Amino acid sequence: FSFMARASYAFIIIMRAKRHTFSARLARVPGRWVTVEVPTRVSRALGIRGTIPVVGVVNGKAKFRSSLLPRKDGLHFLPIKYELRKNAGLDVGDLVKISLEIDHEPRTLPTPEDVMEALEAEGLLDAYALVPPGRKMQFLKYLEEAVHEVTREKRIAMILEMSHAAREKQADRETRRR
């Protein structure tokens, strides 16, 4: 790499590691979500067009862990969850100061032993590894909410189905490549 290429790369890394602060109004989008629009300068500085995991603070006191979600124009918006709004005393239309940075911590939950045993018994451990982390987390949280053992068993069966579907999807991709 040339000196300029290395300097440009280093600049991008520094911009992504940096904490970004901006002010925006809480707005309700069609449906139930309350969001803030992330300024162009912040979206561009992060240099990622897709979903971006972030951690930050609202109004200097309410900490959050969320994701910037992409818009069609390549910019982002930040959903502000109900719990965060309640804890910070915020409502739609309020002007908020947000400070955020990319979250580099893994977003996974440990897989419970009974799920691992079921996956192993069905020969689906390799397929479970193909399931995207966010989807795994969604199902594992759903599993942990089960009150009765019968419900838990049904939800474990759903995880097995999801793993099997991931294996089939991978096989389809490989077939199409040939």
Image (cartoon, grey):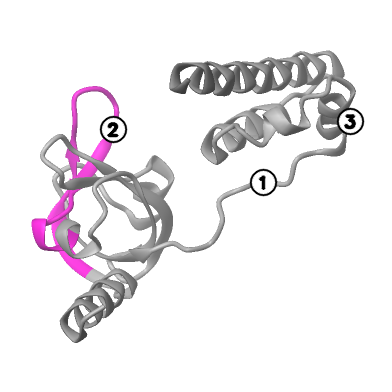
Magenta region, residue range: 21-42
Given this view, does label 1 or label 2 mark the residue nearer the observer?
1
Is 55 or 73 nearer to us in this picture? 73
Is 146 or 100 nearer to us in this picture? 100
Q: What residue do we see at 13% from left, 45% from top?
A: 93
Image: 138 above or below 39: above
What is the CA distance from the residue labelled 2 to the residue labelled 3?
38 Å
**Does label 3 or label 1 sit earlier along the sequence?**
1
Image: 94 above or below 14: above
**Badges 3 and 1: C-beta atoms under 8 Å apart?**
no
The image shows residue 156 at horizontal and vertical percentages of 76, 21
Is 47 or 126 nearer to us in this picture? 126
**Does label 2 or label 3 sit earlier along the sequence?**
2
Q: What residue do we see at 24% from left, 47% from top?
A: 49
| Residue 32 covered by magenta stretch | yes
Q: Quadrant of residue 70?
A: top left
List the residue tagged with mark 2: 33
Mark 1 packing: few (<14 Cα in 10 Å), some, or many (20+)?
A: few
What is the CA distance from the residue labelled 1 to the residue labelled 2?
25 Å
List the residue tagged with mark 3: 117
Q: Amino acid at mark 1?
A: Leu
